[in-house]
Image: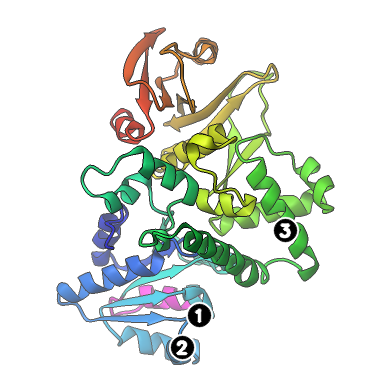
Amino acid sequence: MLIKREVYPSLSEEMNIKGVSVLLGARQVGKTFLLEQLYKRAKLLGLKAVYYNLELPEDLRLFNRSDAQIYNFLSSAGDVVFIDEFHYLKNASKIFKMLFDGKKKVKIYASGSSSLKIHKHLKESMAGRRWVTGLMPLSYDEFLQKFGKDGYSKDAFSEYIVYGGLPGLLEMKNNNAKMRLLNEILGTYIQKDIKSLIKEENIRAFNSLLYLIAENQGSLISENSLSREIGLSAATVNKHISILENTYVCYPIYSYAKKLGNELKKSKKVYFYDLGIRNILLKDFTPYPKREDKGIVAETFVFLQLLSLLKPNMEIRFWRNKAGKEIDFIILKDRKPFLLEVKASLSSKEIPRVFHDFIKHYPETIGGMVVSGEYECEDIIKDKRITFSTFDKFINVLKKKL
C-alpha cells in the first residue's frame, strides 16, 4: 500500500540543495521506504542516482576502505547518493563534509536511527551543511489513507489507538500478527540499538524503566522515584530517558513556567512515539471504548498529532501548578501560549475552569482548544477564542489557527 508521507514534498525539494539530507527515526517508521521513493524520483528527473543499504553485507563491503577512497568512490558514483543505515559508515560526518566541500556537487540522502555518537558529530561538524528530518510513525491523516476517501470511522480511530501507526502493520488484517510484529520491533530495539549504548547489567533495569514509563505515560515523571523502583541511580535513569529521546522512542515535554513562583518548573511528562509500542509493553490491546486508560491514550493520540505540527518557532509544554491545576498541552508559538485540553468524553460545551485561571495570569495567550469525541463549536473568554473540536478534525483546525 502506497502511503503519501507528509514529509515527502519537503524532502524532495532538498534534492536541488547541495549538502546532506538526513532522515532520522526509530525502527520501522518508514525511513527506507521514503529513501526508495526519493531514489525513484531522482531517476525520473534524469539524475544519476545510486542507492546503498549498509545493512546489506555486499553494500557495506563497498565502504570498507579509507576515508579518501570512500570520498573518491562517492564523488564519482552519481549526482545523488542514497545511503540507508548510514550509522554503519565509519567517520560518516567527516566523509559527508569532504563531499560537501569538494569540487563536484554531490547530493547525499542518508537515513539512520541508532547511533547517538554519529548524530552528535553530524550536528557539530556539518553545521550549515545538513538538513535533518525526524520521521514519526504514520500520522492519523496518513493512516486514514488506508481506508480511502471517507476514511474516518470509529473503527479506524480505535485501530490507530490500539495498534499504532507503524507502516508495517497497515496490510495486516490479523490482530495476532500485528501484536507479534510490535513485539519483534520492540525486541530488536532492545537487542540491537540499546545493547550498544548501555551496560549489559543494566538491560533488565532498562526494560523495567520502559514498562514504568508506559504505565505512567502522561503523568509527572520523577527520576528519583523511578530510580528507587528499578534499582538504578537517578543520574542513570536520566541518561536512559535521554537515550529513549535520542533514539526517537520517547518524547519528554516540560512544564510551562514563565513568571509564577508556584508552578512546577522542573517537572516533565514522557510519551512513547507510538501507541502500539506502548500497548505491547503493557500487554494491553483492549479496544478503545473498553479501555481503563482511555483518557491517557486519547491524550497521547493528540500529542502525537501535535508533533507533526511543530515548526522551528514552536514547542509543546504542559502546565500544572502546586495547587494541582493542570492543562494537558501548552503550544508555544513565538513564545505565546495556545491552550489545549483533551477529554476522552465531554458532557457539556463548558470551557474548562483552568483556562480562565491560566489566561488571567497569562493575558498574552492567543487562544485555546478542547479536543473530545463530542463537540464542534467555538466560544470566547477574555477576548480569547476557544474552539471545541473532535479527534478526527482537530489537527486540521489547529493548522489554520497556528
The residue located at (36%, 25%) in the rendering is 389
Type of amino acid at the residue the image marks with label 2: Phe
Q: Which residues are magenta?
A: 94-106
Q: Earlier in the sequence, mark 3 or mark 1?
A: 1
Give the labeled residue for mark 1. Answer: 89
Task: Locate residue 353, reporting x and y percent.
Answer: 53, 11
Pinpoint residue 4: horizontal percent, then vertical percent: 27, 56
Look at 30% across and 30% down and name the residue there.
397
Residue behind mark 2: 63
Compare marks 1 and 2 and give the one earlier in the sequence. 2
Secondary structure under the numbered disc 3 in the rendered image: helix
Badge 3 amino acid? Phe
- Residue at x 57% of width, y 50% of height: 279
Q: Main secondary structure of the magenta part?
A: helix
CB-based contact (under 8 Å), mark 3 and mark 1: no
Q: Dot 3: few (<14), some (14–19), or many (≥20) neighbours within 10 Å?
A: many
Characterize the local packing of mark 1: few (<14), some (14-19) or many (20 or more) Cα atoms within 10 angstroms.
some
Residue 394 left/right relative to 124: left
Q: Confirm or deny contact between disc 1 and disc 2 (CB under 8 A).
A: yes
Residue 128 seen in the current view = no
Occupied quadrant, residue 383: top left
Residue 324 in magenta stretch:
no
Q: Which residue is mark 3?
A: 206
- In contact (CB < 8 Å): disc 2 and disc 3: no
- In this rendering, would 349 be left or right of 297? left
As measured in the structure, the alpha-carbon distance from the residue carrying label 2 to the one carrying label 3 is 34 Å
> Is residue 96 in view from this perspective?
yes
Q: Name the mark on residue 301.
A: none
Q: Quadrant of the N terminus?
A: bottom left
Distance in Å between CA atoms under marks 3 and 1: 27 Å
